[in-house]
Structures are given as C-alpha cells and as structure tokens.
Image (cartoon, rainbow, N blue to C red):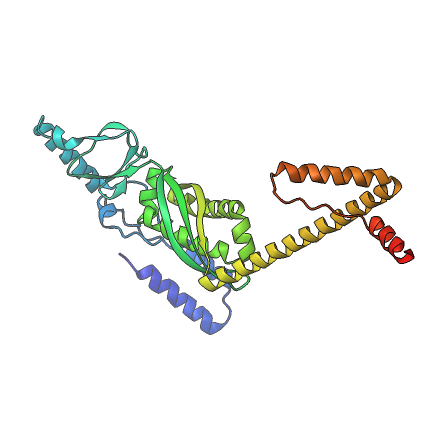
Amino acid sequence: MDSSWMDGEVGEIGLAGLDGDWRGSEVVSNWEKAPRLPVPEKHPCSSLTSSVTPGHQVDGPGLFAHLITFLSVLLILATLPLSLLFAVKVVQEYERAVIFRLGRLLKGGARGPGIFFIIPCVDSYTKVDMRVLTFDVPPQEILTKDSVTVHVDAIMYYKVNNATSCIANVDDYGQSTRLLAATTLRNVLGTKSLGDILSERESIAQDMQISLDEATDPWGVKVERVEVKDVRLPQQLQRAMAAEAEAAREARAKVIAAEGEHKASRALRHAAEVICESPAALQLRYLQTLNNISAEKNSTIVFPVPVDILSSLVSSFRKS
C-alpha cells in the first residue's frame, strides 16, 4: 500500500501549523480527498469462532450445529428400525416433555401428551408432571405483631401451568416453591396479631396465595390454594388463656344468677300484692301446695299455721 500521500499531507499540515496561516477547513478537505483503505471481507466460517458479548442474543444455531444434526438424522435412517427404540418417546396425559437440542431449547414448546420423536445423539428431554401437587409446610416459629411466639403449619396446593418456564427459568421449581411458601408464611403472619391469626385464617390464606402466585408466575407455577392448618401456642400462654376464659365464664354465670334473682323477687312482690287484695287466694295457694306434696308420696306433711290465728289465740289467752 502506497503511503506517500499520507507523508505529503502530514508534511503540508505540519508546515502550515508552523507558519500559522492554515485553516481547519483546509485540513478537513485534504482528509476527505484522501483515498480510503480497503475493508477486509468477512470469512464465511468466522461465525463459528466469533465471541458473544454479554447481553448479546444469538438468533439461531450455527453451521456446526446443523451439520451435527444432519449427521445424526443420517445415522438414525441408516440404523432403522433399531433406531426407533431410541427416537420414539411417549409421555402420559398428565406429563409434558421439554426438549433441548444441543443445549438449546427446541422451538414449539413442550411436547405431549402421546408420542413424540427425538434425535438420540443430539436431543435431551425432561418430563414435567402437570398434576396438582401438595406440600405440607413444616411448623414455623413466628413472632406475632403483639410479641407472642406461636408455631404455625400450613398446606399448599400448586401445579405447573408452563412446562417450558419451570425447566428453563428455575433450577428446581418444586424446591423453590416450597422454600418460598415457608418464607411467605413467616412474613405474612409476622404482621398479624395473635387474635387476627386465630380469627382471620381465610384472609391470611388468601393473602398468602396472592403473594405466592405473583412470585411463582415467572417459574411457570400456579399456586391453587393455601390453608393454615394449625396454630400452636406455648403451654404457659394456653394456661393463662384458659384461666382467663374460666374467669370470664364464672363472671357471666354470676351476672345471670343475679339477674334471675332480681326477676324472681319482682315476681314474688307482684304475687304478694295480688294475694293481699284477695285473702281467699292465700288459702287456694295453700291447698295447691298440699296437692303437690301429696303427689310426691311423702310420709310427713307440714301444716303451716297462719300468724293471724296465733295472734288471736295469744290475745284471748291474755284476756282470760
């Protein structure tokens, strides 16, 4: 490559700079008139050795991957029908198969249910169970909002609604969902008081379900239901609550007995007023009482003596 033009231009620019009478526009025009260096052509195989920068997404498999896939298909055709034992796979109605070809996720999503084909030397697949799974959350020691330590256990029902996401986006979707359920249980109940935990189980379960469903949606997991099974209190707190409940019941019993006595005394007062207005009513009441006593087959009957009779006898004895 001839570099004389570069030497000449640089020399002129240097002299002009020394004289002090050059202009920036002349320098730009000289560079625009200079010939351009030829751009080297890209080698057709350079894509095999090109490095991928972080954040750059490759559109598809390279030439080498297509070559391996083609050779694998030729091998399957050459070994028919023996190769069908390795190429034909079956998944159940409740399962899906996620296929990877040379480490890349195969287009078209998960396969199944039924029969599907793979290339034994190139493809690898993973089965995913789409049924509803249950997880018994182990008892969690939780400090409530009112500083009470309780042990709470729950149960969670979840299933996979996107087989591709649960394999490609998370390492172990089952273990991750279970750990998240235990953490969410502690976080939700930590903001509640003891009374709210005991009385608002349905709202707590609904809050947990919403929180878990939002967190597991990128993993392809759907949380169907969450239920709080048991809330266990410390022994000392149980005894204190039992004593409080017993005292409250005794207080209510005393109040009810006092109200009954009050109502009975008012009824007796009203009855006495009625008897005073009609003296014959007292005799009728006396005969009714004797009838009730005789019905019980008692051998002893007590006859009450009216105070008026005794007073008349006493007065007549004094006169005599």
Res. 49 in view: yes
Q: Quadrant of the C terminus?
A: bottom right
Residue 50 in percent (x, y) is at: 26, 50
Of 18 and 45, nearer the camera is 45
Q: Residue at x 78, y 45 (%)?
A: 267
Residue 280 in percent (x, y) is at: 84, 38
Task: Answer with the quarter of the image where residue 272 lies.
Answer: top right
Please give left or right for residue 98 compared with residue 64 in the image. right
Please say if 141 is above or below 199: below
Q: Residue at x 32, y 32 (%)?
A: 108
Please give left or right for residue 188 compared with residue 133 in the image. right
Q: Quadrant of the N terminus?
A: bottom left
The extreme front residue here reads 320
Res. 58 in view: no
Of 8 and 116, nearer the camera is 116
Of 181 and 20, nearer the camera is 181
The extreme bottom residue here reads 18
Residue 180 in percent (x, y) is at: 40, 52
Total numbered labels = 0
Of 300 and 221, nearer the camera is 300
Q: Residue at x 75, y 41 (%)?
A: 286
Residue 299 in percent (x, y) is at: 61, 43
Please give left or right for residue 155 compared with residue 202 in the image. left
The extreme right residue here reads 319
